[in-house]
Amino acid sequence: MEVNSASVKPDVLPTADAIANARSKLLMTIPDDGIGFEEAKRHLNEDIVPGLNGNSLTANYYGFVTGGATPAAAFADNLVTHWDQNVQVHLPEETIATDVEDRALRLLCDLIKLDPEQWSHRTFTTGATASNLVGLACGREYVIQEAARRRGQTVATSEVGLLEAVRAAGLDSIQILTTVAHSSLRKSASIVGLGRNSVQKVSREDAPHKFDLARLESLLATPCVASIVAISCAEVNTGLFATDRSDGIKIRELCDKYGAWIHVDAAFGLLARALPDTSEYSLLHEGVHCLEIADSITGDAHKLINVPYDCGIFLSRDVQLATRVFQNPSAAYLTPASPSPSTGPVIQSPLNIGIENSRRFRALPVYSTLVAYGAKGYQGMLERQIALSRAIAKHISEGNDYELLPQIVQANWNHVYIIVLFRAKDETINKNLVQRLNGTRKLYVSGTQWDGAPAARFAVSNWQVDVERDMTIVTLVLADALQ
């Protein structure tokens, strides 16, 4: 089943005056008696929402990688708010919530052609940042444990702490080896005690998004240093993939040899595995082969799965390791009920395999949208998104006013996934290109940098995409921005 594209509303962005007007009407102090529900509704609808832009997210919002919510996901999210349950403990005789979460994650694995039985540690998070945090926590536990095992020792970082575990394992440090990583990787490294400086770029000079495999092996072989290899799938600025099939296999061999953990940040690359096996998508399939060699995987459902923020995905192969890291101890009121033979497969309590004790029922919108539109529906959405991205890339390449970035994409548009990076050739226009484009209020793009100069970035990820209709808007706005 295919999702029908909704009509594009006239304005994607609110005006600066509308935002300023809404800001001026925000209350500065809490009223003693309250303004009442009816007045609060009026205040939100008339004073605040116009400043946020009251329209639902349209297909022409190309900022960040923001998908919007399918009708099925939005409907389910309203039910989640109405029910307002904290779904962190598996209580099969009392609630179906954890069963829904388990089934939603199994359906996701089915969609991206991964065997859920091989990915026993499955959970929802707030987003890719939280999933990267979970991945580094698992990776840290594993590499220290593996280093200790190779010395004939047994140690658990989750029990004795990082300093004592590192000493017991005979390690001087832990490094995170990557190419062009998302900023949240460094943030996560800081939180789990490895430090931002532990993240090292191991990039090829001719292709910064790809691994320099010789240098990677040299760093993995460093004595008394444990390693986590973080693969970008796809890189956030360009949408390019850090590995192909042969690179992934080689990285797996190296990590097995040196006791390293492979973490794949597939915040939006994840869904490329749902594409048909055709020549136009062959480079994308090469890019997502790394998921098969990973120890842990990050994904975002609020990107290409098109459910409301905030909803991240985390998968790893070792639920026992995860339980050692995230087990919630000594809280009798959070103890799950004894399993009943009638309840089916073993389902872990989410609070014992992830960060949160308090969590929203994120699984319901995911389950709802997957069953509503199915594998073919999601394949169709993604194919339209890729078709629009490649049409934009082609339009930019064939004109004289803009430059498509980087060079590898100029040479072959089949590298384009859902990101189109570009700049204006006129330096004066390029300095405020993003403001010129967004100032039309007909679309929204993100500003970024490439090779030390400003650039703009389309991220096509909304379920409402219609190639012909949206290209009409894109080409007009790109032309107007030059005036």
Image (cartoon, rainbow, N blue to C red):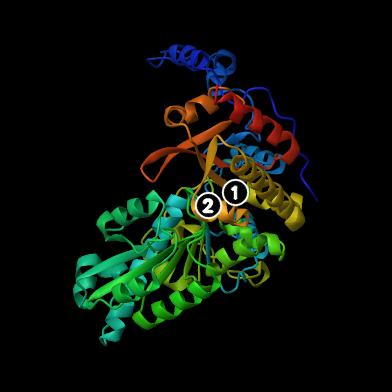
User: Which residue is outermost to the bottom?
Assistant: 152
Q: Is residue 197 left or right of residue 287?
A: left
> Which residue carries the number 2 mark?
239
Residue ID at (42%, 13%): 31
Residue 43 in the image: state x and y as whole percent.
54, 14
- Element on which disc 2 rests: loop
What amino acid is labelled 2 in the image?
Gly
Residue ID at (70%, 64%): 279
Cβ atoms under marks 2 and 1 closer than 8 Å:
yes
Q: Residues within 10 Å of mark 2 (few under 14, many from 20)?
A: many
- Element on which disc 1 rests: loop
Q: Which mark is residue 57?
A: none
The image quadrant that residue 307 belongs to is: top right
Q: Earlier in the sequence, mark 2 or mark 1?
A: 2
Q: Which mark is residue 418?
A: 1
Please name whichever residue, 149 or 409, is drawn nearer the observer in this view of the structure.
409
User: Which residue is outermost to the right?
Assistant: 1
On the rendered image, what quadrant is the C terminus found in? top right
Residue 463 in the image: state x and y as whole percent.
68, 43
Q: Is residue 30 left or right of residue 45?
A: left
Q: Is residue 282 left or right of residue 125?
A: right
Residue 205 visible from this viewpoint: yes
Please name whichever residue, 338 or 171, is drawn nearer the observer in this view of the structure.
171
